[in-house]
Image: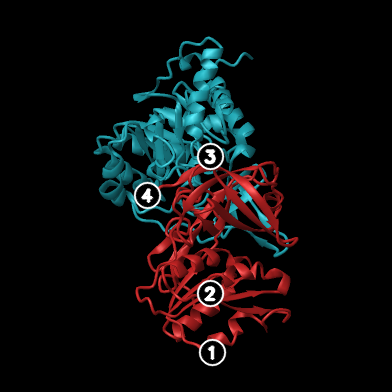
Amino acid sequence: MANLNIKIGKLQLKNPVMTASGTFGYGREYSDFMDISRIGGIFVKGTTIRERQGNAYPRMAETPSGMLNAVGLQNKGVDYFINHIYPTIKNLDTNIIVNVSGSTVEEYVETAEKLNSLEKIPAIELNISCPNVKEGGMAFGTSCLSAAQVVGAVRRAYKNELIVKLSPNVTDISEIALAVEAEGADSVSLINTLLGMAINAEKRKPILSTITGGLSGPAVKPIALRMVWQVAKAVKIPVIGLGGIMNAADAIEFMLAGASAIQIGTANFIDPTVSIKVIDGINDYLDRHGFQSVTDIIGALEE
Amino acid sequence: MKKFILDLVLKENRTLSNQYALLVLTSPEKLPEILPGQFAEVRVDGSSTTFLRRPISIHYVDYELNELWLLIQVIGDGTKRLAELKAGDAVNIILPLGNSFSEPTNKNAKLLLVGGGCGVAPLLFLGSYLKNKGFEVNFLLGARSKTDILQISEYERFGNVYTSTEDGTLGEQGFVTRNSVLKASNFDYIYTCGPTPMMKVIAAYATKTKANCEVSLENTMACGIGACLCCVTDTIDGHVCVCTEGPVFNITKLKWQI
């Protein structure tokens, strides 16, 4: 049994396997199927300063080896989270990390400030990469200047671990990563979804109400892996890898490319217990290859 | 209700037509309690174009035989694969999901269960459930043609069956929404599942005749357990997940223009 413990900045994880925002609800949706406290961390649904209804239906299109979504950050707002959801999940024996989004810098700051006071929320993930909202979201994450601006402002207001979730819809993701590192991000997570589109030819209409949406699933994995590898080389802060991870082998590939931990997203929809299988699979791999600790495989790609 | 991920075994594939298959599934373990109106998320193996599970309504549950029935309409490659399963094949399934149809409070209530096309699926289980509870059940089933009205004898076990076909090959000719039973009787409770335009007409009829009306929606879904927020419908309480708040909705909750 290898040591699966890992640290992401100040964040202590019992293993490097976490679940991605927007794919695991608040954890409790999955508790019938497994002991969710075995997971290294749970990134809860994107949270904004005020309630959002999200985009109109249809919001989802199945695509080859993946899916497009255009949920548009539907959530009940940060105050509802603090008053009604946090009390029901705060005693879980895992890291609950809140994904924070906004339309303006002020909204990001205000939401982050409110989360500062929650004892059992050790980190936030700043979502500057949501492709499904008209204002904010990805607009912040696609230029170094605006990414730096929002991360800098939140850094001054938020004292705990600050993870910044990066958009793949850019020319050079390393530049963005360096810009947010310079503004005090403790770590980066990547990739968010890739902007895509689906059409119903028979009806000559787009499938999504928003026309475009975010692509996830194994279809995006090679791109995600490449970007994690590039960013891990560029920055000094830890990198959390995600994008199409379906099994332990995928997760290990991200760690070899330089990720210190990983998130599982879309795969949760097909196998709700996949994260447990990935934890066990990483352990088997480490034993099989004679590694004492999961830290031994971070960036261990032999180039 | 606790949800389970189960590997069920296909006992029998009753191919009903080139478009429909009835999968009779069983399990070495006792099946969990399932309520009428609930659905399952079925994993599709061996289809390169199918990534997500398929949400399929529970057609019927026979607790004595430990059987779960799913009615599969072939739409794309995923449902084609399911319709081609053979006896002995394992089927990975998450269930029971979603809410259920509600039971009338008055035992003498007049009930009508209206189904169109594959939407007849959950009504068989609902009809059997209500009959067991002592209600008199009336089914109104509609389809394009006689060959699309499936296993009518199964429905007849639990109640009176009225039919409409568009080509007139069975029952009255025309849409189910024009069936004379709607004019001949008044109903206290109407349960409906089928194409949205059909359900809207039935909902309008229910509103006009002051009947309590529940509809079962079949929005496209990814997770089926309220995590992805993809399957929402607009209600008087805002966007809610059809997979957890539904699939059954009282029409007074929906923002339908009827």
Quarter of the rendering containing residue B91: top right
Dot 4: few (<14), some (14–19), or many (≥20) neighbours within 10 Å? many
Q: Which residue is mark 2?
A: B159
The secondary element bearing badge 4 is classed as loop
The secondary element bearing badge 3 is classed as loop
Q: Nearer the viewer, mark 4 or mark 2?
A: 2
| Label 4 with label 3: CB-CB less than 8 Å | no
Whether discs 3 and 1 lie on one chain: the answer is no
Q: Which residue is mark 3?
A: A271
Dot 3: few (<14), some (14–19), or many (≥20) neighbours within 10 Å? some
Whether discs 4 and 3 lie on one chain: the answer is yes
**Which of A115/B48 is in front?**
B48
Q: Nearer the viewer, mark 1 or mark 2?
A: 2
**What's the residue at 34%, 54% (across, down)?**
A50
The colour assigned to chain B within the rendered structure: red
Q: Is residue B258 visible?
A: no
The secondary element bearing badge 2 is classed as loop
The colour assigned to chain A within the rendered structure: cyan
**Residue type pointed to by label 1:** Lys
| Label 4 with label 2: CB-CB less than 8 Å | no
**Which of B58/A220 is in front?**
B58
**Residue type pointed to by label 4:** Thr
Find residue B72 and report its horizontal and vertical position in percent. Answer: 64, 57
Tell me the distance, in whole angstroms, between the alpha carbons under discs 4 and 3: 28 Å
> Is B232 left, or right, of B72 in this rendering?
left
Q: Which residue is mark 1?
A: B183
Q: Which residue is mark 4?
A: A48
Indicate the chain on which mark 3 is placed.
A
**Residue type pointed to by label 3:** Asp
Q: Nearer the viewer, mark 3 or mark 1?
A: 1
